[in-house]
Amino acid sequence: MRWALVKVSLAVTAMVVVAFAIPLGLVIREMARDRAFSNAEREAAAVAPALSITTDREQLERVVASAGSDAGMAVHIPASGAGTGTEGSTDIGRQRATDEDIAAVREMGRASTTEVSGGSTLLQPVALSSGEIAVVEVYVPESEVTNGVGTAWAVLAAVGAALIVGSVAVADRLGVRMVQPAQRLVEGAHDLGEGKLGARVPEEGPNELRLAAVAFNSMADQVVQLLANERELAADLSHRLRTPLTVLRLNAASLGDGPAADQTRAAVEQLEREVDTIIRTARDAKPQTAAAGPGAGCDAAEVVRERMGFWSALAEDEGRKWRVAGADRPVRIPVARADLAASLDALLGNVFRHTAEGTAFAVDLHNGEDAVIVLVSDAGPGIPDPAAAMARGRGSGNDGSTGLGLDIVRRLAESTGGDVRIGSSVLGGTEVRIWIQLDGRATQTRQRGHRGAVRRRRQPRSATTIDRSRSLP
């Protein structure tokens, strides 16, 4: 839009300048010509009184010399009007006009101009005392006819160029005033699309753009309100689960002693904690007003230690060997604590569900400059078709898997710009690699070509909220 306004202004101003400059330049040239011939007429008129009194050559020569340059003026007196002792016509000065032109002026009795070499001549008839007609010839060189025309044209060109430049500058400033509000509207739409619910657009610029900004801000407010209502609904629905959970907890307490009873009570307590977490998260959630900064997220090492402490109890019951590496020092990642815990629970739950008792497993945490890698590996039979397993992450499994576990892990990684890969582990079974970006970039498919990795084509996500409970795929 900005350049379109500049081009239109340039075209219109150029047409106006051309429409006025060309006729004005022609008028200036004509005025210079009229000025030159007016001066010639004044010089010829200065000689006329002397010719009406005398035709003596010497006296006329003095008059011509005093009236103007004798090289540019000539006087032609007929023979009958010449002084005593002369025969034929008397010519004073240099003649440039032809005899025919002089005779025609003498016969017509009015002034005339004629073209000669190097310029023009003015032929002015003057009546003598004898009744004859003398002709005064005044030479007007071409340089005098065009004197000052070039300078005037240069001034006109400079003024025209200044007008064009000024109009382009003004159009550019007006274009900026129109384009900037539109750019802010586009940026606000992008921010809102990226989840920055606090994005708003200043209501400025032309009336149409102001109305568009008002409509955008109103839409953003409605989106925030709808999300708040959705969070409130999730909190209310989760709160309704407390009653059956209370009954379940009381029934679990009456099971007595034993490993199965202890595991059931532990599962009920974990489920109750998860419901409380959902309620608090839904109640306390704030609209996202900016991208996650370096201080946002959680300590991945702490989450790994906590979840391994939970799963280690079950591992001891089933005789599984387990190992944790890289979780001895803090590792900050731009991921919510609950999301990382849900992802680890999903992967570790897969190990317990799809491998035999006594199968070893390990969790490794690697901290790099721009990424953090979480490896969950086991010594099970492995996955013969990793691509199909990743497809089950889309919820297409037909072996009893819901597909939620890998989908939770995938969304966690892709929310930071990372991805998830399935390969073979050093323990001989399956290795799931979670690549978490640390620079907060938007979700994108990364090209890293790790051996054994499986590339997945991203599919449209469901509009429903992911259940981040401890349900295993």
Image (tube, rainbow, N blue to C red):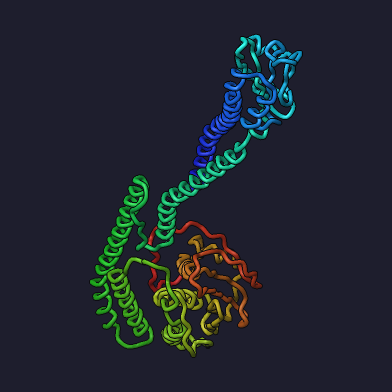
176 or 39, nearer to the observer:
39
As drawn, 229 above or below 242 = above
x then y, percent, for residue 92: 71, 23
- State the residue at coordinates (62%, 82%): 426
The residue furthest right is 87
- State the residue at coordinates (50%, 70%): 413
x then y, percent, for residue 102: 70, 15
x then y, percent, for residue 415: 47, 68
The residue furthest bottom is 328
Instruction: Please identify the quarter of the rendering in which residue 266 is found.
Output: bottom left
Instruction: Please identify the quarter of the rendering in which residue 73 is found.
Output: top right
As drawn, 386 above or below 149 = below
Residue 414 in view in this figure: yes
As drawn, 131 above or below 15 = above
Residue 322 in view in this figure: no
- In the rendered structure, the answer to whether residue 84 lies left or right of residue 221 reads right
- In the rendered structure, the answer to whether residue 461 lies left or right of residue 230 reads right
As drawn, 226 above or below 273 = above
18 or 135, nearer to the observer:
135
211 or 134, nearer to the observer:
134
Q: How many marks?
A: 0
- State the residue at coordinates (62%, 39%): 150
